[in-house]
Amino acid sequence: MNLALADQNILCLDIGSGTQDVFYYMPDQELENCPKFVLPSPAMQIGSRIKDLHARGKNIFFYGRNMGGGFYRILKGCLENGLKAAIHPEAAFSLSDSPARVRGIGLELTPICPEGYYPVHLCDYDPGFWHSYLAQTGLEYPGLILASAQDHGYHPEGSNRLGRFEMWKRFMIQSDGYIEKLIFSTPPVEMTRLVSLKESIGSGYVADTGAAALLGALFVPEVEKLSRDKGICVVNIGNSHTIAFLVYAGRVYGILEHHTGLLNGQKLWEQLSFFRQGNLTNEQVFQDNGHGCLILESAAGSDFRPTFVLGPRRKMLEGFDCQFLCPGGDMMLAGCFGLLKGYSLNRKVHGSALKVQS
C-alpha cells in the first residue's frame, strides 16, 4: 500500500510501556524504504535515570508533564532504599491522579525544586530529543506528528479500571463507534495523558494505543474490506493489556479489555467466543480483574467470526482459529500504521484525505 500526502513528512510514535515504536513517513518513498526505529520508551529512559542518580547519591526533583508511569516500580524501590525525591504537582499525574497516593509512596509535592535536588523532566514527547535524534539520522523535523499512548483518564478517587473503560463507553455511545473518531486533533479533557501529549507535539493528532492497534489492523486492505463486508474481531495482545474490538461497516460494535497477565490462550479464546456472540458481560470481565466489556446491538448479518491478532504477546493464540497480522510488513509498527490510517480516515471525513493507492 502506498500513502501519498503532498510535501509532508510525518513522524508516527506508538508509545508503550517498554518501547516507543517509530515510523518516519516520507511521501516520496515506498513504505518499505521509510525509516523505522524501535527505541526504549520515555518511561524506561526515566527509570534508567532514576537508578543512575540514586546510585550517585543524588536527590531528585521531578517536573514537567503527565506521562506514562512505567518508571513507578523503579522509583518506589529507590525510595524504599533511601532516595529522597520531590515532584511538581503537574508532573505528579504521571503516577496518580490522587495527591495523597503520590505522597504515600514517599514523594514530596512542591512546585519549587528543593535546594540540592537534581531536576528530571517528565514527558512522553521531548521536542529537543527528537530534533537532535532526527538530525543525527539525517532527517528533517517533520511538519506533522501522530502519536499514541495508553490513557487511563482522570480518576482521583475512583478505579482506573472502571475509569478507563468509561472512556471506551463514551466513544461507543457518544461517537456511535465510528472508527475515524478514535484519533483526535483535540483530545477530550478527561484523557489527561493525551492532552499533555498533544501539547508536547504541538501540531498533529493523538490516539490511545488500543485505538492505534485496531486502526493498524484496518491498515491492511483485505482486513478493512472484510470488516466492511461481514464484520471482524481484532485482538491486540500487549505486554500489559489485551484489547479486542468487533468491527463492521466502519463502526465498532464491541470492546473488551483485560490484563494480559491474567489470561492464557484457552481462557482468552473462550472469552472472545462469548464476546463475538454478544454473550460476555461487563460484570464478568470486571470481576475477573479486567477493565470491562461493552457490546452494542448486533450488526445484521455479522457474527464477527474472522479474528485477527496483533501484539507482542500474540503467540498466546497460536493454534486457534485466527490470523496473525503484520501491517505494513512490520508487526511492531502496527500502531504507527494505525495512526496513519486513522489520520487518513479523519481527514477524509473532514474533506482533505490522504490518498491511498494499493
Image: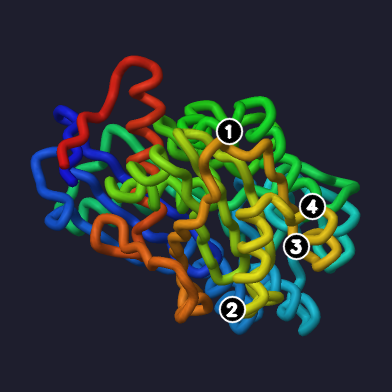
Residue linked to disc 2: 265
Distance in Å between CA atoms under marks 1 and 2: 28 Å
Q: Secondary structure at mark 4?
A: helix
Distance in Å between CA atoms under marks 4 and 2: 20 Å
Amino acid, disc 1: Gly
Residue 188 point in image, percent of width and height: 64, 30
Amino acid, disc 4: Asn
Distance in Å between CA atoms under marks 1 and 3: 21 Å
Which residue is at the far front?
301
**Horizontally, is 230 left or right of 62 in the view?**
left
Distance in Å between CA atoms under marks 3 and 4: 9 Å
Residue linked to disc 1: 177
**The label number, if any, that marks residue 290 in the structure image:** 3
Q: Tag 4: Cα neighbours inside 10 Å, few (<14), some, or many (≥20)?
A: some
Amino acid, disc 2: Gly
Q: Residue at x 17, y 51 (%)?
A: 31
Q: Tag 2: Cα neighbours inside 10 Å, few (<14), some, or many (≥20)?
A: some
Sequence-first tag of 3 and 4: 4
In this rendering, the answer to whether 351 lies above or below 154 is above
